[in-house]
Amino acid sequence: MSQSSDVVIVGAGMVGASCAYAAARAGLSVTVIDRAGVVAGTTGAGEGNILVSDKEPGPELDLALWSNRVWRDWGDQVGAESIELEPKGGLVVVGQPDGMAALTALAAAQAAAGMVTEAVPPHAIRDLEPRLAPHLAGGVWYPQDMQVQPMLAAARLMRAACDKGAKIMSKVELIGLMTAGDRLTAVRTTTGTLTTRHVINAAGTWGGEVSARMETPIPVLPRRGFILVTEPLPEQVIRHKVYTADYVTNVASSDEGLETSTVVESTRSGTVLIGASRERVGFDRSLSVPVIRTLASGATRLFPFLENVRLLRVYRGFRPYCPDHLPVIGPDPRIDGVWHACGHEGAGIGLAPATGAMIAELITGGTSPVDPRPFLPDRFI
Amino acid sequence: MSQFTFDDASVRFEDGQTVGAALIRAGIYSWRTTRNTGRPRGLFCGIGVCFDCLITVDGEPNVRACMREAADGLRVTTQQGTGWS
């Protein structure tokens, strides 16, 4: 079997779907391959965070702010309701007064970088989020934060890409590349050769392995996280994304051991999702009761009513992280035609549209509104 | 033999039986309606995994009928939707 396209995308998660949608809209012919199927990896194991609030000023925040705008545009294009895209806003809270100074300083720096932030004094916090525990020291309100149902969103964008001519091949795995000199000519897969000018590595946590098969290795490693799911409640009793300020430090940390912070939100179906844990334990899928206990007790401290709400299940996934906690986005200088779009850690859902848009712009000779240089793979070569 | 009530009916059970097992033996196969379309639900996996057999016991919603041991005098009721009113 031989088939020809402008772009082959490896990985049918949120980033692969975003690349496919952006490339198809730019007029490129697209083939997406996935060794399993649509959203079989980390996209199907997350919370659907589209956060700006957890980013410190820097390149990732610039990308997040752009991606936030692209999410809103794409929501309008495919139907925000159909993907449960909710501009609900985020509320970051602090338990003890001595934690307020750090959060206030972060919010000031974020505001200077273009984010909308609003300090919430202790007496006003339960007007915003009535079920929160009393006596919190304060918080910051981030109206740009959003939530999406990531599986619906990736599948919907993939379908929209297919409407523009893209093709998806499930249960097809990349084996290697064919080149002429240092120029890509085709992708070798388990079901045959696909002739193509470009290949995009959007394999998420498995992006390291895919990059090695392409002989353009980049370091992408797994960081495990658990999410607890409660029984469905009759309405979305928690109105916003609510998390404790230590989440930001944990996201940026390179500590080897277990880190937990409390992230709580309601979904459209009424369940409450509780996170977030971070562990570097490879691809170990075994259940960790201590992690579940820590997450549950953090959530009930923040929202005491959850004590009487039953947990239905627990799921886990593997965030793809790079050693410097920035995603790898852009052309690989070792082989002309190889692109990377992975390593987004826990922010892949939020950053996916800008990632796809940036690569589509660069492939078609356009310009990216956010400087692509900090994300280029060159830093690992 | 001991018994509990299910809505207006009496259901007999043997010691050690679950609420779900006793209901099935009494010929009752569904005791919950789904949240969105009101479709009937009862035992599916029967081993505590699938959360299909949710039921309200003594006013407590979302109890797994396949996991809750039957007890004399329990007031078991059909659960509508989330069970939270």
Image (cartoon, rainbow, N blue to C red):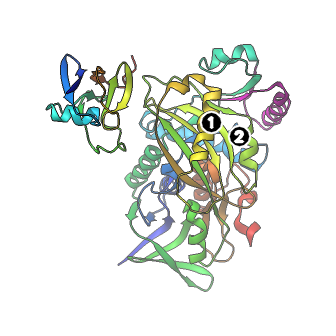
Find the residue positioned furthest to the bottom. Answer: A181
Q: What separation in Å lies between label 1 and label 2 (alpha carbons)?
A: 8 Å
- Image quarter of residue A214: bottom right
Q: Give the mark, 1 or 2, whose residue is nearer the N terminus.
A: 2
Residue at image coords 57%, 28%: A88
Regarding residue A132, the answer to whether it shows in the image is yes
Q: Which residues are magenta?
A: A91-120
Q: In the rendered view, does A113 fall on the left or right side of A32?
A: right
Residue A359 appears at what percent x and percent y? 60, 58
Q: Secondary structure at mark 1?
A: strand
Q: Quadrant of residue A179?
A: bottom right
Protein chain holding label 1: A
Tell me: residue A171, above or below residue A309: below
| Amino acid carrying mark 1 in the image | Val
Mark linked to residue B6: none
Q: Which mark is residue A263?
A: 1
Q: Chain of mark 2?
A: A
Residue at point 43% right, 44% down?
A152
Numbered-mark total = 2
Q: As shown in the figure, which amino acid type bears the numbered disc 2?
A: Tyr
Q: Does mark 2 fall on the same chain as mark 1?
A: yes
